[in-house]
Image: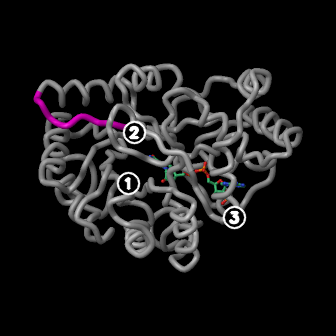
């Protein structure tokens, strides 16, 4: 495993982050394809054994059951002080008023609920899952600052939003002397590169670590365009993210993988890991082989010709996944 600093912080993280949205009770929340605890535990253990120290979950994943599974497994398999545990807030956790969003009430309620489910006193990285257009950004940033000051989170991060929104949040925090975001978890992979326009240059300029979600385009970069999977067939949100014209990029990945004798996942992750500013992709691991591929991608260097072959067929996509 390789380790690096998260952006300009002093925090060490593994260059592969384990995405724990794959683990949870399938009939809770909106991911019917998740692995139950019995199937998830060996994968979390294998990740720890492979040197992964960075784990990502969210309050909404499988209605809190992802946090419960991850908390129990890490509690058993890893020393708390070595682990960088991230969770998120914003998604709706219950119907009715104040059941989601980034109000002071929601943030302070949800951090306590996440800590209870994770079975820990603090998270290392508390991430706002989306922008909340219905709450003043001052209210959110002050509440997040209070979460950090109370010792319930070590750092704060953000996820998919417009660069102007992220800038506004950072500027607001700075103006008031509050804690600023140290990371951006955004949708960035070979099939979706819109973040290269504004967000990635902003993060590079500001020393913000980048931890892309769905780095394998939710599996599409790992298999033929027309081949589905149990997950893909029931992945409602994933169905909104990619376009028929992305097929040529999937074919380019396949052809380079075949020539190099490597898996497609290794090629797609090597491309991302080679992008300046990318700290750690948040990889979805449903099998031990997926984890081995992710770790092996750290040793793959792509040539200039291969990069061109992967990048030149890209066509701009509409912005999706921000709400
Ligand atoms: N902040 C956000 O808004 C946000 C949004 C989405 C995700 N996330 C985070 O990002 C993490 C990763 O998301 P994701 O699961 O969509 O990411 P992904 O890594 O793009 O997709 C994972 C899927 O790719 C396939 N796969 C992975 N490795 C493979 C390999 N070596 N060979 C063949 N197939 C392979 C599997 O698909 P099959 O199961 O279909 O075979 C697996 O379920 C989540 O767990 C979560 O922590 C955050």
Question: Residue at horizontal 44%, vertical 66%?
Answer: 62
Find out if the beta carbon at label 2 lies less than 8 Å from the nearest ligand 1 atom.
no
Read off the magenta span: 176-183
Tell me whether the residue at label 2 lies in contact with that at label 1, contact meaning CB atoms closer than 8 angstroms.
yes
Q: Horizontally, is 33 left or right of 278 in the view? A: right
Is residue 30 shown to the viewer in this render? yes
Verify whether residue 139 appears in magenta. Answer: no
Q: CA distance from mark 2 to mark 3?
A: 34 Å
Question: Residue at horizontal 65%, vertical 41%?
Answer: 269
* Residue pointed to by mark 1: 84
Q: Which is more toward the observer, 131 or 306? A: 306
Q: CA distance from mark 2 to mark 1?
A: 10 Å
Of pointers 2 and 3, the one earlier in the residue sequence:
2
- Please say if 242 is above or below 61: above
Q: Position of residue 22 (x, y in %)?
A: 54, 62
Q: Where, by quadrant of the figure, is residue 191 drawn?
A: top right
* Residue pointed to by mark 3: 230
Of the 4 image quadrants, the one containing the C terminus is: top left
């Amino acid at each position: 495993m390789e380790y690096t600093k998260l952006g300009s912080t002093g925090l060490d993280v593994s260059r592969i982050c384990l995405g724990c949205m794959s683990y949870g009770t399938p009939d809770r929340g909106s991911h019917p394809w998740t692995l139950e605890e019995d199937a998830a535990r060996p994968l979390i253990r294998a990740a720890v054994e492979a040197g992964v120290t960075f784990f990502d979950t969210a309050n909404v994943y499988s209605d809190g059951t992802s946090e419960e599974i991850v908390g129990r497994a890490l509690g058993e398999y890893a020393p708390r002080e070595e682990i960088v545990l991230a969770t998120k807030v914003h998604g709706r956790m219950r119907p009715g008023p104040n059941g989601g969003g980034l109000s002071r009430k929601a943030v302070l309620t949800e951090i306590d609920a996440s800590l209870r489910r994770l079975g820990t006193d603090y998270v290392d990285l508390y991430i706002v899952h989306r922008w909340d257009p219905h709450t003043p950004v001052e209210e959110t940033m002050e509440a997040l600052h209070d979460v950090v000051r109370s010792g319930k989170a070590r750092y704060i991060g953000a996820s998919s939003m417009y660069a102007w929104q992220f800038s506004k949040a950072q500027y607001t925090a700075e103006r008031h002397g509050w804690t600023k975001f140290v990371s951006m978890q955004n949708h960035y992979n070979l099939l979706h590169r819109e973040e290269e326009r504004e967000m990635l240059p902003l993060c590079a300029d500001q020393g913000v670590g980048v931890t892309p979600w769905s780095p394998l385009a939710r599996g599409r970069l790992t298999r033929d365009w027309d081949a589905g999977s149990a997950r893909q067939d029931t992945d409602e949100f994933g169905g909104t993210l990619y376009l028929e014209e992305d097929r040529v990029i999937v074919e380019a990945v396949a052809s380079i993988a075949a020539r190099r004798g490597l898996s497609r996942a290794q090629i797609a992750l090597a491309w991302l890991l080679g992008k300046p500013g990318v700290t750690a992709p948040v990889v979805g691991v449903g099998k031990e082989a997926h984890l081995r591929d992710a770790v092996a991608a750290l040793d793959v260097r792509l040539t200039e010709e291969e990069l061109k072959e992967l990048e030149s067929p890209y066509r701009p996509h509409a912005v999706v996944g921000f709400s």
